[in-house]
Image (tube, rainbow, N blue to C red):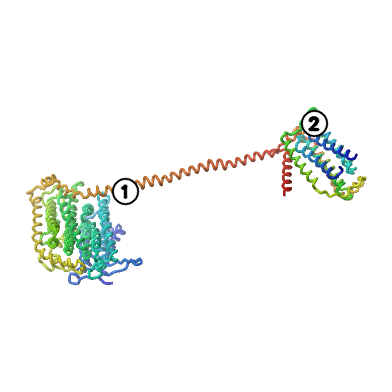
Amino acid sequence: MDVRTKFALIILFLPLASCVLQIFFGRRLGPRGVWISVAAEFVTLILAFSMLATVMLGTPMHHYPEVEWFSLGTFNLTLGFQLDNLAVAMLMVVAIISSFVHLYSIEYMRGDVRYTRYFGYLGLFTFSMNGIVLAHSLMMMFIFWELVGLSSYLLIGHWFEKDSAASAGRKAFLTNRVGDIGMFIGIMLFWTATGTFTFHGLFEAVDVEGANLFAGQTTLLTVAGIMVFMGAVGKSAQFPLHIWLPDAMEGPTPVSCLIHAATMVAAGVYLMVRMFPVLTPDALLFMGAIGAITAVLGALIAITQFDIKRVLAYSTVSQLGYMIMAVGMGAQQAAFFHLGTHAMFKGLLFLCSGSVIHALHHALHEKGDHSTDPQDMRNMGGLRKKMPITYITMLIGALAISGVPLFSGFLSKDAILAGTLAFASEHHQWWAVLFPVAGFGAAAVTAFYMFRLIFMTFHGKPADEAAHKHVAETPAVMTVPLVILAALSFALFFTLPGVNPFQTEGWFTNVIPQSENLTGFAELEAEHLERGFHEAHGMAVPISMSVAGLGIALSMIFYLLGWLNPKAWAERLRRIGLYQLSFYKFYFDEIYDALIYRPFLWLTDKIAWIDWDLWDQWFIDGWGRNTVRAGNASGWLDYQWLDQIVIDGFGRLIDGMGAIGRKLQTGRVQNYLMWALAGVIIAFLVAASI
Amino acid sequence: MDSLQSYLFLSVVLFCFGLYGVMTRRNGVAILMGIELILNSANLNLVAFNRFGGLSELLPGHVFALFVIIMAASEAAVALAIIINLYKTFHTVNVDEAHEMKG
Amino acid sequence: MGNVVFIGVAVLVVVSAFFVVTARNLVYSAVALMGTLFGVAGLYVFLYADFMAAVQVVIYVGGILVLIIFGVMLTNKISAPVLIQTSMPNRALAAAVVFLIFLGLTTILFRTPWHEGVATQPEGTVATIGNALMTRYLIHFEVAGVLLLLALLGAAYLSRRENG
């Protein structure tokens, strides 16, 4: 077996082994046993890095081992790995974040009631996520897609005693399901048209110089592409299925980091990047629109949220929107680039927020306060002196996400924004300019709310002096990951060997080229766009820098310097209703509740009535009741009539006959003689007649 | 008139009367009388056949009838003894009263 | 002339028999029985059975009938002759049965082709019977004797007075 296949198998199954270990032997191993899982994760990190290193040093990865799973007549299902540069890079991302989350969780989850099971589920998730990355066919990816959804459900509902956590887990799973249905339909459409599930097969099928199975049927291809995109809409929390991600914050913070910031939600983007060659311009436009809407929507809601994790959750929604929009603009490289950088700095931001929550939780505990919410930013303030490491690293993360130069986020976001500008210049319809407007607008808002978060949490006066006394920096086990991720949030990391903070070229762009092995119409688009990008790049940089600066400045005015009072402005906005729109998440949950949940529940209620009251109670039980009645009647018939009248009647008849017959026994010989003679006569007559 | 059938007819008549008497009468002695009639009818038959039937020289018919008479005598004696016993027990000879075997 | 007598005897027999079974008074019944027995004896004479006739009279009338009359006397109060008839329905039924039997028998007797042998001649039968009893029917004779003995014993036993 090829060493690359071996590596891939180890990377895939080692976390699963860790899961099995923790689930079945966790109790026996005890809390110390989770270090085994952490070690396993770091082993996969080493392996992933070694594979990435070979690619970085110039050897592109093209390895596609395949094994047959089962076949039913002409239907064959194979399992295999799609080991290309994209997969290797993604594996690295997953491995880094997963390893650090494992490490971080040792301290964060200490003393938890289900400590070992948590690590088991983390292993399960990592296994599933790696499966998505490595999958060589849509069907295989779908299997792991579902598994990832399951892991997410299990981890969100880790503290299932809380109703809110349990229902959040359900909400996540069910919303994902809605998307998955679309995805499955898309997979089936592709299969019906091309007869294959594998990516290779699909690419060949759309090749204009090759099979070109979709010639003249671009509508079908568009629809199939959009249906598969539905899976990404669900998994990556795009509008309108974004509702589950903020609720998913009920899970432990490391889980939020791993699953709902860095990796699982990025799976949708990963899928679309993989599927890029088969997406028609119409499908891409649809994706772009959804992405743009999501980006703006998420940002607008984040402005008013007070829960630190909620802000980050909506931020994630918004950033995912950026990535999807990028794919829609044709800038698939930029999308994946942003995926990578976002994983690093969003992961960092979540872990930092976890650090803050952890410290505050302990401080409140020390004080004896069990009712104050440690996640509410209004209970924070002035933490930078007490938690310097967390402060510095979180600040780095905020700078990265806001798109400040020198940081990785600047490069990736800039690439996306350049893509939107290129798109707008290529397409001269009136609506094309909305994309860059959305992109830059959301960027400004992003910078605003991120620094709002920083200022409210770390600057100013503490909300509760008594609790503030007990606040301390979190242990090294938690801060080491923060530092490492902060280092990875610098632009330099991604541009090596290049050092220009304004240029994206480096090992990353070499590893993930914009256009490579693209077939069909995508080829033309991509080449087209590559030219456009370079032109737009020049324009994008100054605009994005000013937009970011505007956002930060505004945030400073409100929250750091206090020149404008945020509460007063909130009141003004509340009067015209805009504040509520943002604070109440544009009422999506309420709308869904009224339009979808309630009618559906009403319907199920009616159906339940039919099934229970009508069918079960009335019919089935009625059957029973009637059987009882029939039984009673039959019993009555049997007893009264058959038994009493017929059977006993026979008895009485015999009795009567006996009574009559008894009269024959008069005891008088003469009577006997007479009867005997009568008998003789009869016998005589009978004999005579014969 | 002097034919076999006429004697046989007479014997049948006697027999029927005797039968009637046995079946009908309540007094034990009266029943006995009926029995005697029956026996007589048999005797009559026997003797009649002896004359008309071409039996052997030894007059079997007569001998048979003789034995019948002997038996009738002994039977009458025993029967009367029984009747007298009955009278002593039940203080009546009404055979209807002797119905201990009544089912 | 012979026929007339024959018919007269026959009538005597039948009428007497009738009275035997229908008389209410037991004594009348006994007397009628006597008539019947005598009539039968007469019939024996017609049948050239002289010894039989004599035996009939001596034993039947002189022995059995006397015995019967003794029985009548011993078991009845003379002053109150007992009603000896059974209830009506039984009598009717019995009559019907008897009548049927009568019909049957007469039918047989008149339809059967009797084997007519040579009619015997009137001659004395006493010697012949005596002879027969001692030769051919000797065993029967002895048995009959034993039977009579047994009857005697039986009757005597039955009518003994119970002690105590």
Give the side of residue A171 with respect to residue A557, left or right.
right
Q: Residue furthest top?
A: C79
Comparing C39 with A14, the one in front is C39
Secondary structure of the residue carrying numbered label 2: loop
Residue C149 visible here: no
Image coordinates for residue B44, horizontal then vertical, percent: 84, 43
From the image, which quarter does the N terminus of chain A lie in? bottom left
Give the side of residue A560 with respect to residue A523, left or right.
left
Mark 2: few/some/many CA within 10 Å (<14, 14-19, 20+)? some
Q: Amino acid at mark 1?
A: Thr
Secondary structure of the residue carrying numbered label 1: helix
Label 1 near label 2: C-beta < 8 Å?
Answer: no
The numbered mark at residue C25 is: 2
Comparing C138 with A665, the one in front is A665
The numbered mark at residue A604 is: 1
Image coordinates for residue A352, horizontal then vertical, percent: 17, 56
The numbered mark at residue A410 is: none
Residue A131 visible here: yes
Displayed quadrant of residue C10? top right
Displayed quadrant of residue C149? top right
Mark 1: few/some/many CA within 10 Å (<14, 14-19, 20+)? few
